[in-house]
Amino acid sequence: MTRDIIAPSTTLCLQCPLRELEIFRHRSRADVSYIQAFKAGEEYAGPGATLLHENEPNTRLFTVLSGWLFRYRTLEGSHRRQIINYGLPGDFMGLQATLDDPMGHGIEALTNVTVCYFEQDRLWELFADHPQLSFDMTWLAAQQERSFEEQLLTLGQRTGFERVAYLLWHLFDRARDVGLAVDNVIELPVRQQHLADTLGLSLVHTNKTLQKIRELGAIDIRERCLYVLNEAHLRELGRVDSSFSQRRPLL
Amino acid sequence: MTRDIIAPSTTLCLQCPLRELEIFRHRSRADVSYIQAFKAGEEYAGPGATLLHENEPNTRLFTVLSGWLFRYRTLEGSHRRQIINYGLPGDFMGLQATLDDPMGHGIEALTNVTVCYFEQDRLWELFADHPQLSFDMTWLAAQQERSFEEQLLTLGQRTGFERVAYLLWHLFDRARDVGLAVDNVIELPVRQQHLADTLGLSLVHTNKTLQKIRELGAIDIRERCLYVLNEAHLRELGRVDSSFSQRRPLL
DNA sequence: CGTTCCCTTGAGACCGCTCAAAGACCGTGG
DNA sequence: CCACGGTCTTTGAGCGGTCTCAAGGGAACG
C-alpha cells in the first residue's frame, strides 16, 4: 500500500511495443520523437501498490505502458470506495487531476505496472507547439467522457445483474483491444471487491450474481482468468449496446 | 418534443452578458473576436423541446447562452433514461459527441434556451490557430470529467437520501455560480422525474425522500423554486465534500 | 502449518421498487 | 366563468433486490 518506485528507465517511444497494435493510430517518426522529448520518465509499481494517494496533489500525466491499475474516490468520512475507471496498456490518464482543485482521487496498481509520465507543467508547451498532439489529447479526453457516461448509465439504470455482466464484458473487450486476450480468455487481476466497488454493489451480492452468470454458461472465472464462453450472450445479459473498437491515438 | 428552431440571431460575443460574471475568466478582445468568428449561429428551444434526438448524428459544439437543458442516454430496448448532466448558462457542451461513434444521447430543453453553436468540423482549425482556446477547451473537458467522477461517486456510493440532497445542493450551487440565485432561492425548472432519472431512483422514492429533506428544514420547494433554507445542513445531508467555485474559461 | 487474503454460502433486515389512486396545478376551450 | 384534460406531485401498500452480519472453505505464502 506504499509508494513503490524502483528506478528510472528508458523505454524509447520509437520502440514502444504498444505502437505495433492495430488499435492505435499511426504516428509519424517526428511526432513520436516529440513525445519522447516530452516524456519525463517511467514509474513502476507492484500489485497493491499505490501510485497516487488520495488527496496527494498530482502533477503528472501518464500513459500506461504495461499492467492494470485503477483510479478511485472515497466518500468523505466513510470507507465506501468508488472505482472510477481502470487503466490498461495504452490508456492516457491524469488530465482531470491537473486542475488546481484539491478534490482527491487515488490510483492503485493491480499488477506489475509501468507508466510513462509527463510533467503537467509542460502541458501548455505542448498546446503551443504541437496542435496535432494537443488535439489527440483532447480527443482522448472526450472519449474518456463517453466512457464515463456509459458508466453513469450502468450505475443509474442497469440492474445489479446487468451491471456485473456489463462490466465483465467491458473489461474483456478492453483487454482484447490491446492484445491481452488469448482465445476469449484474459487474465483478470481484479478481485470481486473491485468489481463491487466499481458497480456500487456489495461484495456478497456481487459474488452471488457472478454465480448466476456462471450458471448461465456465459462466462467462467478460474485461476485469475476470465473465460468468455459466450460473448454474444454476455453482451445481452449486460445490455451492451453498439460499441465497436475505434482506432485511437497513443501518447 | 420536436425540433423547435425559431430564427438565427446575432448576439455579439463582445457584448455577451455572461462575460460580466465573476465566475468566468477574463479574455482579451482579440480572443473574443476569434470566438465570434468561430461562432456559427444561435439556436432556440422552448421547454420540453428536443435540441438533439438520440441517435441523431451531432456535428455541433455549443455554449449555453441562457436557460437550462439536460443531456441523457437511454438503455437500449428499455424506457429507462439516465440524465447525464445539466447545461446551464456558460456551459460548453458537445465535445464527447464529436467522435465518429454512433453511440447516442439526447438533449432536451427545460426552459427557454439559447445556445451559441460552432461547427465541429472547424475544431481542428481552432487547435491549429489558437493554442489558448484549445487549451481552454481541454481544461473544460477535464473539468467535465471531474464532474462525471463526482456523479459516479454519487450513484455508486451515496444512499438514496444522500443522492437527493447532493443533487439539490449541486444544482443550487451551479445556478448560483452563474448568478441565477437570489437570496438562497433559485428557479428550479427540473421535475421530480428528472431528479429521479439523474439519480437512478424511482419517481416515488425520490418524492418521499424530498419530503424527508423538507421536514428536516434544509430546503423547501414551492412554485418551481428551490429554497435552500440551511445550506450547511443540506451539504452535510448530501455528504458534499470540498468544492469551491473556480473561475473558468468561457467559449 | 499458521496466517492472510479471497471466495462462497446462509439468514434476516431494510431500502427502494412497482402498482395504484387521489390531489394539485395549469392552460385551453366551451 | 367553469369544465376539462394533461402534467406533476403526493400518499399508501406490498414485494423483492440488495444489504449487513456471520461463518466456513480454499489457496497462497512465509
Image: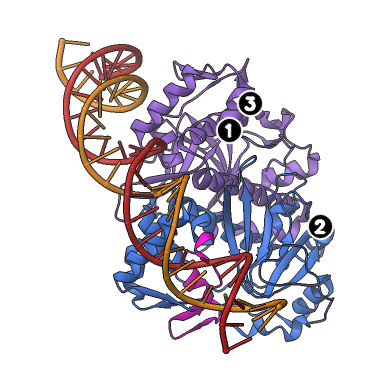
Chain colours: A purple, B blue, C orange, D red
Amino acid type, residue under disc 1 in the picture: His
Amino acid type, residue under disc 2 in the picture: Trp
Q: Can residue B241 be seen in this view?
A: no
For label 3, count other residues whose C-alpha is less than 10 Å away and answer few (under 14), some (14-19) or many (20+).
some
Disc 2 to disc 1, C-alpha distance: 31 Å
Residue A241 falls in image quadrant: top right
Q: In this view, does C12 lie to the left or right of B164?
A: left
Name above or below for residue A42 compared with residue B168.
Answer: above
Magenta span of residues:
B171-193
Q: Is residue B163 one of those drawn in magenta? A: no
Q: Is residue B176 one of those drawn in magenta? A: yes
Q: What element carries label 1?
A: helix
Q: Residue B124 carries which label?
A: 2
Count of numbered circles on the image: 3
Amino acid type, residue under disc 3 in the picture: Arg
Q: Mark 3 points at which residue?
A: A176
Q: Mark 1 points at which residue?
A: A170
